[in-house]
Image (cartoon, rainbow, N blue to C red):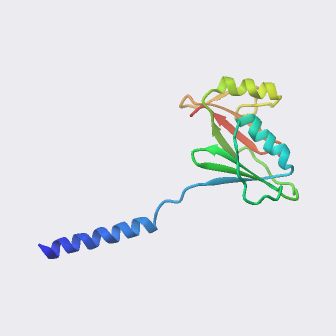
Amino acid sequence: MIKLISSVLIVFSLFTINHKTMAQAKITHIAVYVKNLKRSTDFYTGVFNFPELDEPFKDGLHTWLDIGNNLSMHIIQAPWEPVTINKINHICFSIPDMDGFIANLNKLGIEYEDWPGKKNTINIRPDGIKQIYIRDPDGYWLEINDEY
């Protein structure tokens, strides 16, 4: 009996140690390369109302934003080199109120479109989720949906 209990404890210990070392990775932040830090910071704080976080570099080339769910966005200004930007490669943000969000886009003069590219149109996925696409100041595609 003691031998059985010892064996079970050893197997449990090995499983626990292995499980901890093989833990699933998690995302902590998204880094976005930008041409003009102020312009991009103003865009993300104005469109999404993301609060700024304390940024450790203090070099005038970084802004850190709280994007919810214990995640942050690091906006990083560097000497600009053209990048290839495709709608398939996008960041998605979910919002609780699509109508209110679109009203804010209209107020800010920011165009939106559906997946195929029809201006001022909301796409409805097969599961009923509404989604639109906008571009940030550097041309990066952002999906906005109401899967909040």
Q: x and y percent of residue 144 in the render? A: 67, 35
Residue at left offset 66%, top offset 45%:
66
Side of 24 where 111 appears, left or right: right
In which quadrant is the N terminus drawn?
Answer: bottom left
Instruction: Indicate whether 134 appears above or below 61.
Output: above
Front-most of 60 and 128? 60
Q: x and y percent of residue 88 in the render? A: 70, 45
Task: Name which quarter of the figure residue 130 lies in.
Answer: top right
Q: Can residue 89 be seen in this view?
A: no
Q: x and y percent of residue 107 in the render? A: 80, 25
Front-most of 129 and 60? 60
Q: Is residue 34 visible?
A: yes
Residue at left offset 83%, top offset 42%:
137
In which quadrant is the C terminus drawn?
Answer: top right
Task: Name which quarter of the figure residue 81 lies in.
Answer: bottom right
Residue at left offset 45%, top offset 68%:
21
Front-most of 69 and 51? 51
Side of 11 where 83 appears, left or right: right
Instruction: Indicate whether 130 appears above or below 87.
Output: above
Q: x and y percent of residue 116 in the render? A: 72, 34
Instruction: Indicate whether 9 appears above or below 67.
Output: below
Q: Return the residue found at the far bottom.
A: 3
